[in-house]
Image: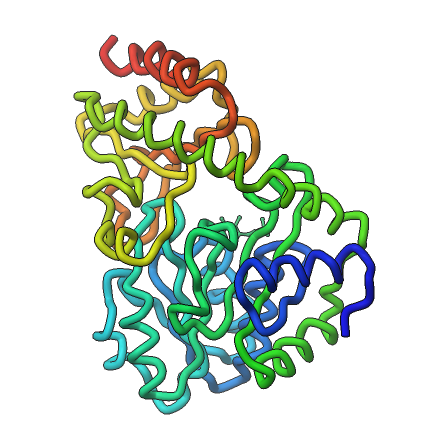
């Protein structure tokens, strides 16, 4: 029943890519997250989210949702089947985000789905990292998959869009009610930017992933680096689940410099980067680097030492040369 306008076509394309029953397009990934919470939770309800979830999603949990009397409890991202001990009679939603934001923890989604199914609780995933193609959420039993299309799908840092894909007719009704009552529709013009992005998505992803892996390997050999948090490298928490469940990686990952490095030196490193821009976003054509002064538990000890990179479409050798000259700041 979709009309043939821009956002109807985009919804149909995302549903096809993700193998969803139905997809709703929203004005951003954060909007998509909010719709899911409000579609499934009411006053007195309880929901579970990983500690490594996207920060603004946690802000919403601790802010407006708390004001509404919805209790959102965080769980360690490495918790799989053990999550069943945290499910209560009033638990209405279990969020996953895999890999998680900043520290890239890959979750054992099938084990979480198993625990949730036994209790009859729906599982949602923030599937933005996989761009709708690298992790098949519905084949792994997830009920709702949201994406920030702002990232790899739109792909040029010039649109803010999100998607909410559902596995069943029941969830289509419940999510659709929240989506329409909150006025979450987007304009066809905005949607057309994501449709254009989809035309080059596989080529961009491939290039970004290959360059990202080369840079991650280079970083892992630097003496100043304590660890590289890239799902395809063994130091990444949950690497074994990435190997089992994912079709590939992207160019988004983090690294942590050794604790003896002064915070000012880390700032200096970022300041000296020339080809990399500074920015919180990811998935665009320009490579970005960002330092995170504060991290939530269980990774607060990485605060100020973790740098996230989004590798774009520049030549990988040029990006490595840029990092190489910036790293001189740490040894100076
Ligand atoms: C960026 C991001 C979002 C929010 O998406 P917007 O489109 O910027 O609103 C949600 N989840 C993750 C994991 C993100 O990185």
- Judging depth in this view, the residue of 172 and 199 nearest the camera is 199
Instruction: Name the image quarter holding residue 305.
Output: top left
Residue shown at 55% from the left, 80% from the top: 168
In the displayed structure, would residue 177 be above or below residue 107?
below
The percent position of residue 289, horizontal first and vertical second, equals 44, 29
Colour approach in the figure:
rainbow
Residue shown at 51% from the left, 55% from the top: 132
In the displayed structure, would residue 74 be above or below residue 247?
below
The percent position of residue 81, horizontal first and vertical second, equals 23, 74
The percent position of residue 122, horizontal first and vertical second, equals 44, 79
**Outermost residue toward the bottom?**
89
- Judging depth in this view, the residue of 62 and 284 nearest the camera is 284
Residue shown at 62% from the left, 71% from the top: 22
Instruction: Give the position of the C terminus as an image quadrant.
Output: top left
The percent position of residue 39, horizontal first and vertical second, equals 59, 78
In the displayed structure, would residue 271 be above or below residue 289?
above
């Amino acid at each position: 029943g979709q009309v043939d306008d821009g956002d109807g076509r985009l919804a149909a394309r995302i549903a096809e890519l993700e193998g969803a029953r139905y997809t709703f397009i929203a004005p951003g990934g954060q909007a998509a997250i909010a719709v899911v919470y409000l579609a499934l939770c009411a006053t007195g309800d309880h929901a579970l989210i990983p500690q490594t979830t996207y920060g603004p999603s946690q802000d919403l949990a601790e802010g407006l949702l708390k004001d509404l009397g919805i209790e959102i409890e965080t769980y360690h991202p490495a918790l799989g089947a053990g999550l069943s001990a945290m499910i209560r009679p009033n638990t209405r939603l279990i969020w996953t985000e895999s890999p998680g934001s900043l520290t890239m923890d890959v979750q054992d989604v099938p084990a979480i789905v198993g625990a949730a199914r036994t209790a009859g609780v729906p599982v949602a995933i923030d599937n933005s990292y996989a761009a709708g193609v690298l992790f098949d959420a519905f084949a792994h039993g997830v009920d709702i998959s949201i994406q920030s299309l702002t990232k790899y799908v739109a792909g040029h840092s010039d649109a803010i869009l999100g998607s909410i894909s559902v596995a069943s007719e029941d969830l289509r009704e419940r999510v659709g009610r929240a989506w329409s009552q909150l006025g979450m529709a987007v304009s066809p013009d905005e949607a057309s930017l994501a449709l254009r992005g989809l035309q080059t998505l596989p080529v961009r992803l491939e290039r970004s992933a290959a360059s990202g892996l080369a840079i991650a390997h280079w970083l892992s050999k630097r003496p100043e680096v304590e660890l590289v948090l890239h799902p395809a490298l063994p130091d990444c928490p949950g690497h074994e689940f990435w190997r089992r469940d994912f079709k590939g990686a992207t160019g988004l990952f983090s690294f942590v410099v050794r604790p003896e490095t002064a915070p000012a030196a880390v700032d200096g490193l970022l300041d000296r980067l020339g080809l990399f821009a500074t920015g919180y976003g990811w998935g665009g054509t320009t490579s970005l680097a960002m330092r995170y002064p504060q991290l939530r538990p269980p990774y607060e000890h990485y605060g100020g030492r973790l740098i996230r990179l989004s590798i774009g479409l520049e030549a990988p050798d040029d990006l490595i040369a840029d990092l190489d000259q910036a790293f001189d700041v740490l040894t100076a």
